[in-house]
Image: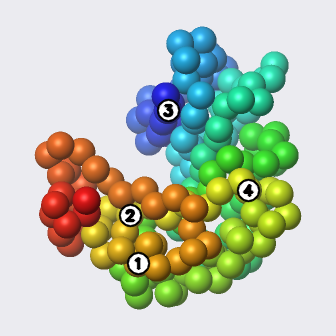
Amino acid sequence: MCFGTLVLGRIRANLSPAEGARAIRRGLELGVNFIDTAAAYGTYQQVRLGLDGGHDEVIVASKSRACTYDAMRLAVKEALRKMNLACIGIFLLHLVRSKEDLLGREDALKCLVDLRNDGAVEAIEVSSHSPHGVRAALDYDEVDIVFPIVNKCGLGIVQGTLDEIL
């Protein structure tokens, strides 16, 4: 069960680190074993505090829209440092729109591969709101997980339909 932290941060509820950590700990008590976050959400400190006391079985995922090797490396290192993690379970190359977009971000993907080989990242994911981005990600053996936006109404899908993204 996943706890998406976007709602805790500055984009939505703007909870303090202590309040956000309390919500995360309550989620863990209720069976959450997967936490989704991002630097853009402003919730790394909340996640760090929420995981204090040992929750090694919890998978943490974060993401970046970085295009370059150095920018992706910085994004991953920041996530590790701010959440006090030795390794991030899943790191996403976020919101890939098309084959051309993914081609333009191959250096960032290469960085994730290197970080996976070094043990800083367990799995590499590509997320997309577009059928074109999903299909592009399927062409890369380096990608462990492809994450399309899917819901019964097709909300949030761009440049295509629910049927095309499935």
Give how far apart the Cα atoms at labels 1 and 4 are: 22 Å
Q: Earlier in the sequence, mark 1 or mark 3?
A: 3
The residue at 64%/22% (across/down) is: 21
Give how far apart the Cα atoms at labels 3 and 4 are: 19 Å
Q: Please give the label number shown on residue 2.
A: 3
In this rendered view, identify the residue nearer to me: 28 or 70: 28
The three-letter code of the residue at mark 4 reads Val
The residue at 46%/79% (across/down) is: 139
Q: Position of residue 48 (x, y in %)?
A: 73, 32
Discs 2, 1 touching: Cβ within 8 Å? yes
Q: Which residue, given by chain and number where applicable, does mark 4 sit on?
A: 121
The three-letter code of the residue at mark 2 reads Ser
Q: Which residue, given by chain and number where applicable, does mark 2 sit on?
A: 128
Q: Residues within 10 Å of mark 2 (few under 14, many from 20)?
A: many
The three-letter code of the residue at mark 1 reads Ala
The residue at 28%/50% (across/down) is: 150
Residue 95's place in the image compared with 5, above or below, is below
Q: Earlier in the sequence, mark 1 or mark 4?
A: 4
Dot 4 falls on a residue whose secondary structure is strand
- Protein image colouring: rainbow
Q: Earlier in the sequence, mark 3 or mark 4?
A: 3
Q: Earlier in the sequence, mark 2 or mark 4?
A: 4
Q: Residues within 10 Å of mark 1 (few under 14, many from 20)?
A: many
Q: Is residue 78 left or right of residue 158?
A: right
